[in-house]
Amino acid sequence: MRRGIRYSDGSLFAWVSHPRVAPMVQLFGVALTGTGSCLPARPVSNDDLAAAFDLDTSDEWIRTRTGIRSRRFAAPGETSASLGAAAARTALAAAGLAPTDLDLIVCATVTPDLMCPANACLIQAALGCRPVAAFDVSAACSGFVYALSAATQFVRTGAARHALVVGAEVLSRAVNLTDRNSCILFGDGAGAAVLSATPDAGTGVRSVRLYADGSGQELIRVPSKVSPAVLPGTAAPLGRDFIHLNGREVYRFAVTRMIELIRLAEADCRELGVPGIDLLVPHQVNQRIIDAALADTGFPADRVVVNLDRYGNTSAASVPIALDEAIRTGRCNRGDTVLLVAFGGGLTWSSAVVTL
């Protein structure tokens, strides 16, 4: 039987046992051994948001267009790195590991504490790890799956035995809180997962697909301080510290890519001999996007994790928070196959099939 990892060009990195040929590299299965999450304590309801920032909106207007009822905002002393470290501690406890057992840390974020050093290094120090490799990944809302893929390669080839993957964001500090079209969508939080080498290639990360299309970069942008203050051909400041998005075009992109990723994952499962997808964990951005994709693919709504009503869009933290919540509430169990799907700025889109 072919076993391996599916790449975005459709190729299958596969390995088979052969009695007369020794492999050049020992390849391992990559098990997901623990998850964790951390949400700020402060909930901000739609009504709270509208009142605090004098927005021309209401709870009904936001709910009917997005499905979001509330989100969490970080307290003054909280950062994406501190939230990420807290989520990591929970994931390590679930995996039965100590920080000193880790060989690699990869953090996905678009709201790091600093431009340098990386959030992953700050998390490494906060946990008290050995001086192991630690780096960040920037792929917006697809970031966690991108980081998961990178860590998978380290573990699969034996370069790391245990890897920590974190998605952490404080988007409340990157939005214009007077713009009702964008500020209503985002929240803060962090999620984490531990990947560990296993001799069982029939468990853990089974298939990964990563894509990007930079020609759509203008649809979702966080220019920030590394971008020019003035756009070419203009004299006006960009308002560079805030998220800019084209909601209508982002909706079309997200629905199309979510449909595509679900269908490709189902095909990957068939080719890899995986019985099927037991649970779908999508990026939590908009209920309408999820509903439209489910209607087209026929994937059952009762097998989809949705928590955006409580947390909003937490970008790279979205998928790991939802995955951790699904595991801890019994929505999925050992032996189940979970599909992680994400899409966001870049434009990027990604998926991973994981057997627990």
Image (spheres, rainbow, N blue to C red):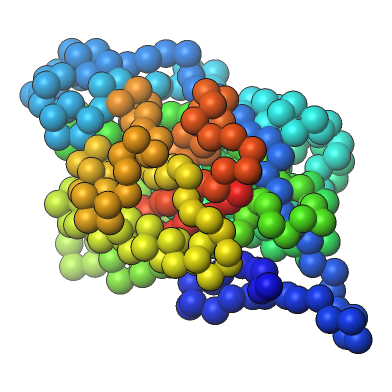
In the rendered image, the quadrant that contains the C terminus is top right
Side of 336 relative to 317 (left or right): right
Residue 205 showing in the rendered view:
yes
Side of 178 relative to 221 (left or right): left
The residue that appears at 32% across and 43% down in the rendered structure is 300
Task: State the image coordinates of residue 338 (x, y, percent, origin top left).
Answer: 51, 46
Residue 246 showing in the rendered view:
no
- Quarter of the rendering containing residue 27: bottom right
The residue that appears at 61% across and 59% down in the rendered structure is 206
Against 148, is 126 above or below?
A: above
Foreground residue among 330 and 222: 330
Task: State the image coordinates of residue 332 (x, y, percent, origin top left).
Answer: 53, 35
The residue that appears at 54% across and 26% down in the rendered structure is 330
The residue that appears at 31% across and 39% down in the rendered structure is 301
In the rendered image, the quadrant that contains the N terminus is bottom right
Circle count: 0
Task: State the image coordinates of residue 140 (x, y, percent, origin top left).
Answer: 43, 50
Foreground residue among 320 and 202: 202
Against 325, is 120 above or below?
A: below
Task: State the image coordinates of residue 257 (x, y, percent, origin top left).
Answer: 31, 60
- Quarter of the rendering containing residue 44: top left
Side of 310 relative to 128 (left or right): left
Against 205, is 287 above or below?
A: above
